[in-house]
């Protein structure tokens, strides 16, 4: 039992390292704003269309937030999928907290 737990711990450490390399794109306003997030939720890049730059600051801010939230949701989903793969499809009975 202890060896299985150790193997699972090593596998989870490997998965957590791999998760840092994931990148997802979120968008809003019909792709007027795009955000790319890395697996550790660090924003890698942001694209704001020229049309968007002509809008009021409040609208631009809302579009940026919506694109970020879209990327965050996609990243959560992708992370969950990768964790399920690592555990062989077994859903863990607790909220697994990653170090990022």
Image: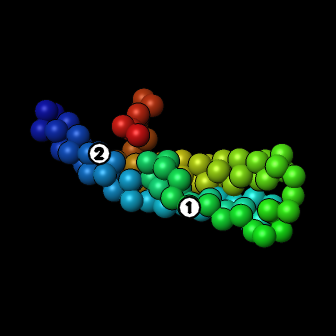
Residue 28 appears in the picture as rendered = yes
Nearer to me, 62 or 92: 62
Q: Is residue 54 above or below residue 83?
A: below
Whether residue 38 sits left or right of residue 57 in the image: it is left
Whether residue 12 sits left or right of residue 23 in the image: it is left
Q: Quadrant of residue 13?
A: top left
Total numbered badges shown on the rendered structure: 2
Q: Quadrant of residue 74?
A: bottom right
In which quadrant is the N terminus drawn?
top left
Residue found at x 31% / y 52%:
17
Residue found at x 13% / y 33%:
2
Whether residue 85 sits left or right of residue 8 in the image: it is right
Residue extending farthest bottom: 50
Nearer to me, 21 or 89: 21
Q: Secondary structure at mark 1?
A: strand
In which quadrant is the C terminus drawn?
top left
Residue 12 marker: 2
Nearer to me, 31 or 52: 52
Mark 2 crowd level (few <14, some 14–19, many ≥20, 10 Å Cα): some
Residue extending farthest top: 94
Mark 1 crowd level (few <14, some 14–19, many ≥20, 10 Å Cα): few
Q: Position of residue 64 (x, y in %)?
A: 71, 52
Q: Position of residue 14 (x, y in %)?
A: 26, 51
Residue 45 marker: 1
Disc 1 or 2, which lies upstream in sequence? 2
Q: How is the image coloured?
A: rainbow
Residue 30 appears in the picture as rendered = no
Q: Position of residue 92 (x, y in %)?
A: 40, 37
Q: Are marks 1 and 2 in contact (CB under 8 Å)?
A: no
């Amino acid at each position: 039992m202890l060896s299985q737990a150790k193997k699972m711990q090593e596998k989870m450490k490997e998965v957590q390292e791999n998760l840092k390399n994931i990148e997802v794109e979120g968008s809003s306003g019909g792709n007027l704003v795009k955000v790319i997030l890395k697996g550790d939720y660090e924003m890698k890049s942001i694209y704001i269309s020229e049309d968007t730059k002509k809008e009021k600051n409040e609208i631009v801010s809302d579009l940026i937030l919506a694109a970020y939230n879209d990327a965050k949701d996609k990243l959560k989903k992708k992370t969950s999928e990768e964790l399920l793969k690592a555990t062989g499809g077994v859903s863990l009975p607790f909220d697994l907290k990653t170090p990022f």
